[in-house]
């Protein structure tokens, strides 16, 4: 009688996680912040000292911009010419307390150089930012609605279709003073 031996061990995602993280130029701290998973847990996963829950695996896959199956696979995939990131895979920084959500559209490997986001502001919502590094600029294109932009004490109303370009190396606020939701695309350029 032949016996079949199956491997019931959980997948070891540590090496794959580390490979994907390093390929994107992210530190453990960067990935911790983006995915909302503690740095110590990430370290344990990468060293194969812990296996992540499905919820943590989902957060990590979203933060890295990959399908959950790719994170669970130990296969090294060949480069694709076209990589589609589905809407549910795009990391979002929720600011519900302040009436905004910020979807991270740019790839993580460009963070700190060029970043682009989709900003959604509820009526009365605002995204208040402290000064970024010297020389940083932002470019804000209004897709729907109207927003008020405040930079260095100067305020301007930006309407649908317009783009505002401004220094982001000083405190700045983007607010929706209207009665309808506003959406904008924001590009941050670091010098």
Image: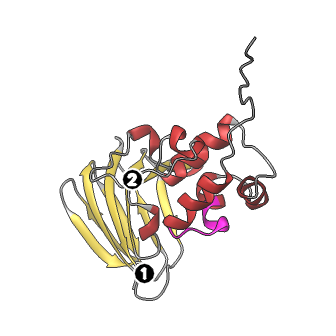
Label located before the other in sequence (2 or 1): 2
Q: Residue visible at 40% across and 48% down?
A: 120
Viewer-nearest residue: 2 or 95? 2
The residue positioned farthest toward the bottom in the image shown: 134
Residue 185 location, x and y as percent? 31, 57
Q: Regarding mark 1 in the picture, which secondary structure is present there?
A: loop
Residue 134 location, x and y as percent? 46, 88
Is 14 situated left or right of 89 in this image? right
Q: Is residue 58 visible?
A: yes
Disc 1 target residue: 152
The residue positioned farthest toward the left in the image shown: 161
Q: Residue visible at 60% across and 45% down?
A: 59
Residue 161 location, x and y as percent? 18, 56
Viewer-nearest residue: 155 or 44? 44
In the image, which residues are magenta?
24-31
The answer to whether residue 42 is magenta is no
**Contact? badges 2 and 1 (CB < 8 Å):** no
Query: Quick one: label 1, few (<14), some, or many (20+) residues within 10 Å?
Result: few
Q: Regarding mark 2 in the picture, which secondary structure is present there?
A: loop
The residue positioned farthest toward the right in the image shown: 49
Viewer-nearest residue: 172 or 94? 94
Residue 118 location, x and y as percent? 37, 53
Disc 2 target residue: 78
Q: Which mark is residue 172?
A: none
- Quadrant of the drawing holding the C terminus: bottom left
């Amino acid at each position: 009688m032949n016996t079949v031996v199956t491997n019931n061990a959980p997948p070891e995602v540590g090496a794959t996680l580390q490979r994907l993280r390093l390929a994107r130029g992210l530190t453990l701290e960067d990935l911790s912040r983006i995915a909302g998973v503690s740095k110590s847990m990430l370290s344990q996963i990468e060293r194969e000292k812990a296996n992540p829950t499905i919820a943590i695996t989902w957060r990590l896959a979203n933060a890295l911009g990959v399908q959950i199956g790719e994170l669970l696979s130990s296969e090294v995939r060949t480069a694709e010419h076209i990589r589609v990131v589905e809407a549910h895979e795009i990391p979002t920084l929720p600011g519900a307390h302040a009436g905004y959500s910020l979807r991270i559209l740019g790839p993580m490997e460009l963070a700190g150089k060029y970043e682009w986001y989709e900003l959604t502001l509820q009526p009365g919502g605002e995204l208040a930012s402290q000064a970024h590094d010297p020389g940083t600029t932002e470019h804000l294109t209004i897709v729907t609605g109207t927003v008020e932009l405040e930079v260095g004490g100067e305020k301007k109303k930006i309407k649908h279709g317009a783009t505002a370009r401004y220094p982001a190396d000083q405190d700045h606020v983007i607010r929706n003073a209207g009665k309808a939701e506003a959406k904008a695309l924001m590009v941050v350029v670091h010098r």
